Amino acid sequence: MKEFLNTLNDINSAINDFVWVKIGIILLIGTGILTTCVTKFFQVSHLGHWWKNTIGGVFKKESKATRKTDKQSISQFQALCTALAATIGTGNIAGVSGAIVMGGAGAVFWMWVAAFFGMMTNYSENILGIYYRRKNSKGEWCGGAMYYLKDGLGSKKHCKTLGSVLAVLFSIFAILASFGIGNMGQVNKITLNLKSTFFKNSTAEIGDTGISIPALIIGIAIMILAGLIIIGGLQRIAAFAERVIPFMAVLYILGSLAIVIYHISDVGNMFKIIFKCAFDFKAVGGAAGGLLIKQAVVQGCKRGVFSNEAGLGSSVMVHSSSNVKEPVIQGMWGIFEVFFDTIVVCTMTALVVLSSGAIDLNTGLAAEGTDDATLVAASFSNVFGRPGEIFVSLAILLFAFTTVLGWSQYGTRAWEYLFGEKSSKFYRIFFVLLIVSGSIMTSSIAWDISDTFNGLMMIPNLIGVITLIPMVIKLTRNYVNRNIKGEDEEPILSYHPEIQEDHKSTLND
């Protein structure tokens, strides 16, 4: 059995290295650069417009962004919060500190680069998701990479079979990833974190099974809470996310900001070492300097992608459930999603890590033996004592728990595409029951395999996005001409004629 697990681990490591390191980062960043160029740097050139029509519109009275138009769909803001529920996870805390420990302070700069271009990858995914979506028998919007692969890529000459096959592969990978990265992996992080914070001295186990009683209790509690929300479907998940995500994110940002202000005299040095380590071969001298920069690029870009999921095609499945009619409007929410997740939340974590005392602000390197998993908690504890440690523990709990909820919806949509709507309740039940196993499992191979499936999602998705770049250009140009330049042009809203006519007749409602 041990030999089998070792062989399985070796095979998975080879696939994971190929998917994420050999082609993944290049493909993801390359797609981001391509979509940025073909949209004429939309995230910068139309910064004021997309800001006003996303988060800026939330605070307006009678805002369309927060308004629900029917019982089956969700509002634009609910779609954002549900997507953020899945993307803002433990990676925003432990993942960022891990990138800095492994790649030095320069990893933060490359994380920003990945996010900058990832904004337009996410934008492109979301406008394609809205354009190719359809309604199911319940009247709910269903969209995602599987639909623009089948209908978009599949409509091109000699690509019908290819589009259908890639759509099926994407759905399979999404379901498998939802069980691992989106479920057991997150629950395992919650359990380990709560045990280390509140049950440090507990050794209670069930017989000779090796199963910790505190871990089992935590798993059952999470299963019950998650089950009450997940079984209720998208409407209940979106309603929960809309209330919890803003509170959770703002509280974490304020806590991180307090740490930064406490170390305000070092902030200048923090940003200086970030840029220095990102480019300066002399930061640690000679070949070691070149190796550090390579590590900074790989770890920073990888963390940026892991954090905001731009290019994986995951968040498209919930953004497509929005009641929005203009594909570009939801695309702009995709830009904001990446901006907030990485540029805001991950940057605050990075500054907290750099202020922990474990990172040398002259070289950007971590002290030998530094544990990246506890850096953020240590930094909060240095300033606030025991309450700071508890705060980080609860933040990880909320981040990971909402990630479970968000990924349950991704898996549901992928399951429905493969097996139909009526069977989706079986997926939800199994997903909820699987939560307990995440709290008691100790083997890392399950997480490594699910990480591979997470990466495998991006390959068919990015094939679809790159192939459909002409449609992204067409939809963007049409929107800009009508809504920014004020030209009289026929709106392009949907691939499906009946939806196009319906949206067109009610576009200004």
Image (cartoon, grey):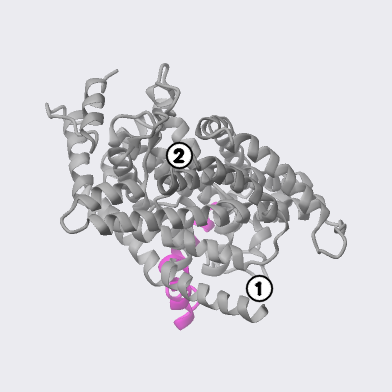
Residue drawn at the location 77% of the way across and 53% of the way down: 215
Q: Is residue 140 magenta?
A: no
CA–CA distance between discs 2 and 1?
52 Å
Q: Main secondary structure of the magenta part?
A: helix
Q: Amino acid at mark 2?
A: Glu
Label 1 sits on residue: 368
Label 2 sits on residue: 421
- The picture quadrant where one finds residue 203 is bottom right
Per the rendered image, the range of residues in magenta is 267-296
Give the left or right position of residue 241, taking residue 204 as reference. left
Give the left or right position of residue 396, taking residue 122 as reference. right
Pointers 2 and 1 in contact (CB under 8 A)?
A: no
Q: Is residue 293 magenta?
A: yes
Residue drawn at the location 63% of the way across and 63% of the way down: 372
Residue drawn at the location 36% of the way across and 61% of the way down: 459
Q: Work out whether residue 361 or residue 118 is closer to the camera in this orientation and state it.
A: 118
Which residue lies most toward the left here?
488
Q: Position of residue 317 (x, y in %)?
A: 41, 43
Can residue 59 be seen here? The reply is: yes
Is residue 256 depicted above or below 357 in this figure? above
| Element type at mark 1 | loop
Q: Position of residue 325 (x, y in %)?
A: 30, 29
